[in-house]
Amino acid sequence: MYRKLLHDLWVGTRITLAITIVCGIAYPLVMTGISQVAFHNQANGSLVTDAQGNVVGSTLIGQCYYKTIKDSSGNVTYQTMKDKSGNDMYFAVDPKYFQSRPLWLFASKTNPNGSTTSSLVQPACNAASSIGSNLGPSNSILITHVTEYTTYLHSLGVAKNPDGTDAPMPVDLVTGDFTGFDPDISEAAALAQVSMVATARHLDATRLRQVVEDHLSGRSLGIFGSPYINVLQLNLALDNGAAG
């Protein structure tokens, strides 16, 4: 009886050790080796570096290009545009850079008179706040912010017709994604911003448009999704003098 028990324990131990070695050591090492050889960039976070080789971000994580200010304590925060009541409506964009999708993460409160006001959550572009607003398309707060932000972008020269009138605004420029860190925008959204960026940087708009087109990535496997432009890589190219 005891001999059979010891035999069964030894068999179970050998099976456990074999599975541990194969699945816990060998398989991870093989997969890591294959990924490092075949998909080196993706396996290491799809990191983006500047001309000096410094890591400035990842193609998988969107960044903010808003104007910054310092508070009384010297902390750097993103500048916001406010309504007549002093509530934060949206972040002030830096016109020298192409903008990603906006951040629509609000903190709402009910006033004594029963009305509701909302303010943008600071700090912006905080990985700990990777979440959407959860506001539906019929929500009055979202509608107000999107409408006001659209008007604001038009005032900066985004989505303009040749005669100076307002053109339809690409939807991804005024609506946020659920994570708040979408790194890409559509071709239409990038081209709509060419005039704003060219004016702010004193660049030739035609040449800048070509830089935008040069950064256009196609559909995944040629059939999935839509063509897109990575905002970080485009703005980094501008800082490196791609458009003059």
Image (tube, rainbow, N blue to C red):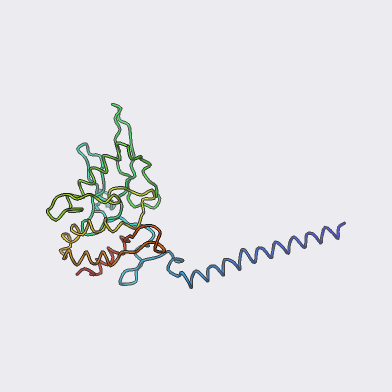
For the point 19% across and 67% down, the residue is 207
Q: Position of residue 131 (x, y in %)?
A: 39, 47
Q: Nearer the viewer, residue 240 or 144?
A: 144
For the point 36% across and 54% down, the residue is 181
> Looking at the rendering, which quadrant does residue 53 occupy?
bottom left
> Looking at the rendering, which quadrant does residue 133 occupy?
top left
For the point 30% across and 65% down, the residue is 215
Which image quadrant: the N terminus?
bottom right
Q: How many marks?
A: 0
Q: Is residue 156 left or right of residue 16?
A: left
Q: Position of residue 70 (x, y in %)?
A: 25, 52
* Residue extending farthest left: 163
Q: Position of residue 80 (x, y in %)?
A: 24, 47
Q: Position of residue 199 (x, y in %)?
A: 15, 60
* Residue extending farthest top: 113
Query: Relative to 182, is 28 above or below?
Result: below
Q: Is residue 129 left or right of residue 167?
A: right
* Residue extending farthest front: 223
Which image quadrant: the C terminus?
bottom left
Q: Nearer the viewer, residue 93 or 79?
A: 93
